[in-house]
Amino acid sequence: ATGTVHAVAAGEATITAKAGEQTATCKITVNNPRATLTTEPTANTVDITAGSPVKLVTAGEASGGTMMYAVTTTDTKPTSTDGFSATVPTAESFADGVYYVWYYVKADSNHTDSEISSTGIMVIVRPS
């Protein structure tokens, strides 16, 4: 009734307690903590022209992992992290138009990935 279990690492353990003739077991799973976003990226405030090396967003900062970015032409949240890159996207490979920058934190070996941002950062790329 007064026992305490302390997690020391991610993994699974089965705890067995015995008192007299009574025995009880409990399976425990400890997950790595989620990598976290410490500073969100924001839309670049300078005039962004198509084909320029200007970054679409400021770089975000993360704890427990690496910031990852993806660009889409719609405001529909990506359903997977396929196509994300650690490089902050620039206007170099984009024509003029409206784009959405999505991000998440790809975890290091001691964390799990964060969720993809719930809202993309809208960026307007102007004609060159």
Image (tube, rainbow, N blue to C red):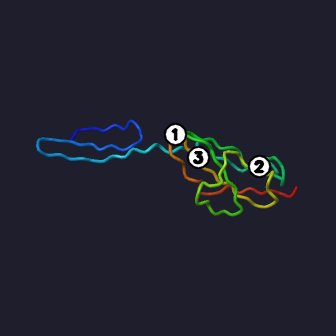
Q: Is residue 102 left or right of residue 23?
A: right
The circle drawn on residue 51 is: none
Q: Position of residue 103 (x, y in %)?
A: 63, 51
Q: Residue at x 83, y 55 (%)?
A: 50
Q: Which residue is mark 3?
A: 105
Task: State the SS at label 1.
Answer: loop
Foreground disc of the pair 1, 2:
1
- Quadrant of the frame with the N terminus: top left
Camera-side residue: 122 or 79?
A: 79
Q: CA distance from mark 2 to mark 3?
A: 19 Å
Which residue occupies 80% across, 48% down? 46
Q: State which quarter of the image contains the C terminus.
A: bottom right
Is residue 114 shown left or right of residue 49?
left
Q: Are marks 1 and 2 in contact (CB under 8 Å)?
A: no
Identify the mark nearer the N-term, 2 or 3. Answer: 2
Q: Which mark is residue 109?
A: 1
Q: Residue at x 39, y 43 (%)?
A: 11
